[in-house]
Image (spheres, grey):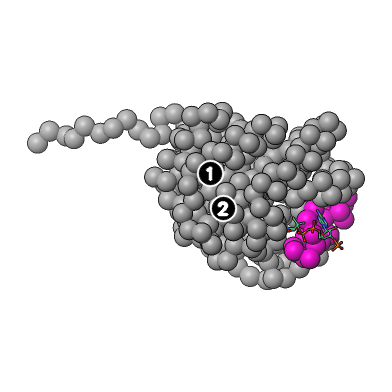
């Protein structure tokens, strides 16, 4: 019997390097029941900046009534060490948030909106058009001060209130956000519903007009598909991946949303495929161990659990 003719390897064009954009201190802690003390958040961020990370999202300058877990945003921003070569960023929903962030020393901010009206309204109390108008008051003035602005689009692959989301709505938002002048757009699978063929379809539509470096992958692992989805994005040449230490995370205004792709799991997968991230996995695990104690529950990261098991068996 002759052997079947296999298609060319999916992985023949993998990038040599991927940037991990760590969102644990922000996306990770915003969904925790327990309020982590400010000093512990600062220790977490300082620890993360010694693991090789170059991008860390540290907090959000939002209405503290909406996200009480991050109500100490200014103290966190003022309290951390600023390590050379590390970009420290934060979420800002409006001009008020941006001004407070800049006053606290932030030079990288991120605006956020959803591809579905209902999630947008629940999350920021505005329509999508009103939210874009609020961004116009943020992006121009931020750039005039030399502050870089990233944008998130949530519910790209599905909305907890509306279900399926038309990719044309995502395309439209990517066009509008680029026209506003953001440097990168992170595509959020807020409730972790995406599957690899859908990711391939959506990303190809966006890559038809948007350069790879202007897009980032942001997957929550609610249904176990985050790593597979990231692999599709990386194979398509996207080189920024958002993830959270230990797999913490979730949006409080998206029912059922759970943790981000775990930084340790993503880094393990990428390193195993010969893709450099510059990160030290054991240093990440050390921080996750401390964070698990602060949040008071086990962390979902599979690599984290496996490494702790190995350490136990080796007696250290
Ligand atoms: P609002 O209540 O409609 O705001 O909230 P408002 O403009 O009517 O003002 C009401 C009050 O909020 C006023 O104070 C404002 O000063 C204050 P009062 O007069 O009542 O004392 N306020 C602020 N305070 C502090 N900082 C600010 C600020 N702005 C107004 N920046 C608002 C509108 C957008 C502020 C609110 O809805 C909000 O804060 N939402 C935050 C929601 C959020 O953070 N969600 C989670 C992050 S998104 C996410 O996780 C998804 C992502 O990870 C990607 C993915 O996974 O898909 C990014
Ligand atoms: Mg998120």
Q: Is residue 302 among what the camera can see? A: no
Where's residue 179, x and y in %?
66, 31
The magenta stretch spans residue 248: no
Q: Residues within 10 Å of mark 2 (few under 14, many from 20)?
A: many
Q: Is residue 245 above or below residue 110?
A: below
Q: Is residue 73 above or below residue 236?
A: below
Q: Is residue 126 among what the camera can see? A: yes
Q: Nearer the viewer, residue 305 or 94?
A: 94
Q: Quadrant of the C terminus?
A: bottom right
Q: Nearer the viewer, residue 13 or 194?
A: 194
Q: Residue furthest left?
A: 1
Residues in magenta, as a range: 61-80
Where's residue 105, x and y in %?
87, 43
Q: Which residue is mark 2?
A: 116
Q: Is mark 2 within 8 Å of ligand 1?
A: no
Where's residue 251, x and y in %?
63, 60
Which disc, if any, is residue 169? 1
Say which element carries label 2.
loop
Q: Is residue 140 left or right of residue 312?
A: right
Q: Residue furthest right?
A: 103
The residue at the point 16 percent across, 34 percent down is: 3
The magenta stretch spans residue 67: yes
Q: Are marks 1 and 2 in contact (CB under 8 Å)?
A: yes
The CA distance from mark 1 to mark 2 is: 8 Å
The residue at the point 65 percent across, 37 percent down is: 177
Q: Quadrant of the N terminus?
A: top left
Q: Is residue 199 above or below residue 13?
A: below
Q: Nearer the viewer, residue 210 or 55?
A: 210
Say which element carries label 1.
helix
Of the numbered discs 1 and 2, the one sitting upstream in the chain is 2
């Amino acid at each position: 019997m002759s052997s079947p003719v296999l298609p060319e390897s999916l992985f023949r064009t993998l990038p040599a390097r991927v940037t991990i954009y760590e969102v644990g201190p922000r996306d990770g802690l915003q969904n925790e029941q327990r309020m982590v003390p400010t000093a512990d958040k600062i220790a977490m961020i300082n620890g993360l900046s010694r693991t090789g990370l170059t991008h860390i999202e540290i907090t959000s300058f939002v209405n503290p009534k909406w996200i009480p877990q991050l109500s100490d945003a200014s103290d966190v921003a003022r309290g951390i060490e600023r390590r050379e070569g590390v970009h420290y960023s934060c979420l800002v929903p409006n001009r008020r948030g941006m001004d407070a962030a800049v006053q606290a020393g932030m030079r990288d901010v991120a605006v956020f909106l959803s591809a579905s009206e209902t999630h947008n309204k629940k999350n920021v109390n505005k329509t999508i058009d009103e939210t874009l108008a609020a961004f116009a008051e943020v992006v121009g003035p931020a750039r005039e001060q030399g502050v870089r602005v990233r944008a998130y689009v949530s519910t790209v692959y599905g909305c907890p209130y509306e279900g399926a989301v038309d990719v044309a709505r995502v395309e439209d938002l990517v066009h509008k956000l680029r026209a506003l002048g953001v440097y990168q757009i992170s595509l959020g699978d807020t409730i972790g519903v995406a599957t690899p063929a859908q990711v391939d379809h959506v990303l190809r539509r966006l890559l038809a007009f948007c350069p790879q470096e202007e897009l980032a992958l942001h997957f929550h692992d609610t249904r176990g598909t985050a790593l597979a989805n990231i692999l599709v994005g990386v194979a398509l040449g996207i080189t920024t991946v958002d993830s959270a230490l230990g797999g913490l995370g979730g949006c409080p205004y998206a029912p059922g949303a759970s943790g981000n792709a775990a930084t340790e799991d993503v880094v393990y997968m990428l390193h195993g495929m010969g893709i450099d991230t510059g990160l030290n996995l054991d240093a990440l695990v050390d921080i996750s161990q401390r964070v698990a104690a602060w949040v008071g529950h086990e962390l979902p990261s599979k690599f984290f659990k496996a490494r702790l098991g190995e350490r136990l068996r080796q007696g250290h």
